[in-house]
Image (spheres, rainbow, N blue to C red):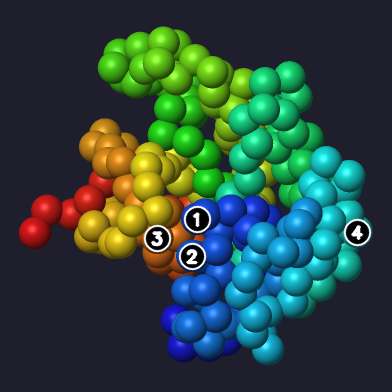
């Protein structure tokens, strides 16, 4: 992608988000980021426009979306999501605003244990979700609800969901590829690179794929 684009990033101060912001800037793009705590996003760059705000207190989305090409959401707060579908509430505000501003492409990063609409989780994933990962059940259910909303009401938006398996902040372990079956626990950096890449992939539109490392 040679032409400069503008990315609006929600979750830019998170571990995957920070890698995504750095990558997009290195590639010559402009990034607009909404963060709760300005100190958590250490990156400084002339093409980085950082706004302070919180998606639970809906910002002026129309203004944030002005002249934006791509929107990416990498939000998550397991404690809040135990009792509130914060991401679903936000996405239900975001999608209409995207329509008003003519922004089409949207990537939502969910967890690898989230369940796409009208599908069953693989037995192993179902078991993990309901046992060792049960403390994150609210987060999974929030992601489930976002995917259901996108599938049922946003066919006019070029959305895609990355059901990511995020494990560590270590160095890159390789290149992730889309998969509807295989699944890898990946580094934050590799998930960010994957997110950046599939945003440009028309074949990823309206998919809920997981990701796995390519075999060398």
Of labels 2 and 4, earlier in sequence is: 2
Left-right relation of 182 to 77: left
> Left of 124 or right of it: where is 26?
right
What element does badge 3 sit on? helix
Identify the residue at horizontal 53%, vertical 46% (top origin): 109
The answer to which of marks 3 and 2 sits earlier in the sequence is 2
Asked whether the viewer can see residue 99, the reply is no
Tag nearer the camera, 1 or 4? 1
Q: For the residue carrying disc 3, how many other residues have a C-alpha within 10 Å: few (<14), some (14-19), or many (20+)?
A: many
Q: Where is residue 124 drawn, in percent x and y?
A: 29, 17
Q: Residue at x 37, y 42 (%)?
A: 167
Of residues 10 and 146, the one drawn nearer to the viewer in this rendering: 10
Residue to which mark 4 is pinned: 60
Whether the residues at callouts 2 and 1 have beta carbons within 8 Å, the answer is yes
In the rendered structure, are the residues bearing label 1 and label 4 in contact, judged by CB atoms less than 8 Å apart?
Answer: no
| Residue where numbered disc 1 is placed | 16
Crowding at mark 4 (Cα within 10 Å: few <14, some 14-19, many 20+): few
Q: Position of residue 190 (x, y in %)?
A: 35, 58
Q: Are marks 3 and 2 in contact (CB under 8 Å)?
A: yes
Secondary-structure class at tag 2: helix
In front: label 2 or label 4: 2
Look at 41% across and 10% down and name the residue there.
Answer: 131
Residue to which mark 2 is pinned: 19
Query: What residue did someone put label 3 on?
Result: 189
Dot 1 lies on which element? helix
């Amino acid at each position: 992608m040679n032409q400069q684009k503008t990315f609006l990033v929600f979750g830019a101060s998170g571990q995957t988000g920070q890698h995504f912001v750095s990558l997009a800037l290195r590639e010559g793009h402009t990034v607009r980021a909404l963060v709760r705590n300005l100190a958590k996003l250490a990156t400084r760059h002339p093409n980085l426009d950082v706004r302070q705000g919180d998606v639970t207190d809906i910002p002026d989305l129309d203004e944030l979306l002005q002249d934006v090409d791509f929107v990416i959401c990498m939000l998550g707060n397991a404690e809040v999501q135990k009792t509130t579908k914060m991401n679903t509430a936000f996405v239900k505000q975001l999608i209409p605003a995207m329509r008003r501003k003519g922004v089409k492409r949207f990537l939502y990063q969910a967890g690898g244990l989230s369940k796409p609409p009208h599908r069953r989780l693989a037995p192993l994933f179902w078991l993990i979700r309901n046992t060792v990962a049960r403390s994150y059940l609210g987060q999974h259910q929030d992601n489930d609800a976002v995917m259901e909303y996108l599938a049922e009401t946003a066919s006019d938006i070029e959305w895609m969901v990355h059901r990511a398996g995020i494990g560590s902040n270590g160095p890159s372990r390789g290149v992730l590829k889309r998969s509807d079956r295989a699944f890898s626990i990946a580094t934050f950096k590799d998930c960010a690179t994957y997110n950046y890449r599939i945003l440009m992939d028309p074949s990823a539109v309206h998919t809920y794929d997981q990701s796995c490392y390519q075999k060398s």
